[in-house]
Image (cartoon, rainbow, N blue to C red):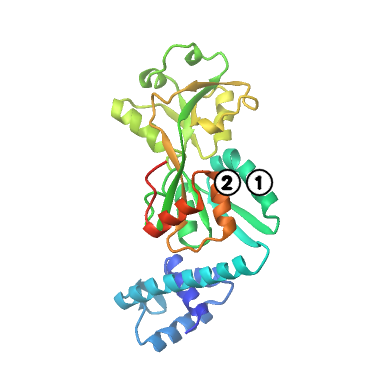
Amino acid sequence: MNLQQLRYLHEIVRRGLNVSEAAAALFTSQPGVSKQVRLLEEELGVTIFERSGKRLTGITEPGRQVLDIVVRMLDDARNLKRVGEEYAGEASGTLDVATTHTQARYLLPPIVKRFMERYPRVRLRLHQGNPHQVADWVLDGEADLGIATEALAGAPGLVTLPCYRWSHILVAPRGHALGDGRPVTLARLAEWPLITYDPTFTGRARIDQAFERAGIAPNIVLTAVDSDVIKTYVELGLGIGIIAEMAFDPVRDAGLTAIASEHLFEASTTRLGIRRGSWLRRFDYDFIELFAPRLTRRIVDMTLKGGGEDPGL
């Protein structure tokens, strides 16, 4: 038995039991992966995968138990490497952070700058995707930390901590009727075409819930995953935008008017997710605290030991 065989098993499961895709992801050959899986099954004396000819069709009951242990062993191997990096001397290594466009574009730039100045020998890699991808990347070990508003809190296998709360705002072209100073209601807002986030992004669930509770059908004509895209189409006069408050810059967005809407939609919470069982390096803790100053090492460690999430903010 060796770690490479365990990585093969893990990647096969990640790729939906597609051995060819697993082999490609691991830069090796499909026959080689199949052979090593067979050798491991023979060594353990159990059948891990159900088969139909040469195709894998499922996971046996003993196979599920084996795979649970494999995940823990690979986590421990990853943690051992981190311990070595931590105590080898000057801080170095790689920090992979998975996040959404809004976080990467509007919140992270000053944090990344300060982090890189503090740790010039650490390579920081940002992975951008939707919140479900962010959760999956952290769970699969492709990212060390995940930052997103949706999906993280409900992902089994992740320990999550709240970073900050925020509200949505409305953006409209300068001189638009909604900016006349009168209170904006959901009914009044629904009279206009709306442009907002894709359903998996940036607090979109709060928007949908507000209209649903009011029994009002919004006229959403366009959705996007990118706040800048939303603002671009608002500037073209195609509708009223609903975006995260941190995505509005009065200087850069001089052609738009921001209209408060915290009374219309519930506040959202951006969370940080860490794979349960992860061993954090000093620079991991420092990045977390740079992003969310209240998340000190003590609080992060207490939450990790608890194995769940810190409910406070």
Are discs 2 and 1 less than 8 Å apart at CB?
yes
Q: Amino acid at mark 1?
A: Arg
Q: Is residue 220 above or below residue 103?
A: above
Q: Is residue 15 above or below residue 3?
A: above
Quadrant of the snapshot with the C terminus: top left
The residue where tag 1 is placed is 114
Q: Where is residue 157? Give x, y as percent.
A: 39, 59
Q: Amino acid at mark 2?
A: Leu
Q: Residues within 10 Å of mark 2 (few under 14, many from 20)?
A: some
Q: Nearer the viewer, residue 237 or 231?
A: 231
Q: Where is residue 143? Give x, y as percent.
A: 53, 58
Kindly report the distance in space between the C-alpha atoms of the residues bearing marks 2 and 1: 8 Å
Examine the rendering and report whether any part of residue 240 can be seen.
no
Q: Which residue lies at the image location 47% right of the left edge and 69% below the top edge?
A: 75
Q: Is residue 219 above or below residue 272?
A: above
The residue where tag 2 is placed is 290
Q: Which residue lies at the image location 64% right of the left edge and 69% below the top edge?
A: 88
Q: Nearer the viewer, residue 289 or 204?
A: 289
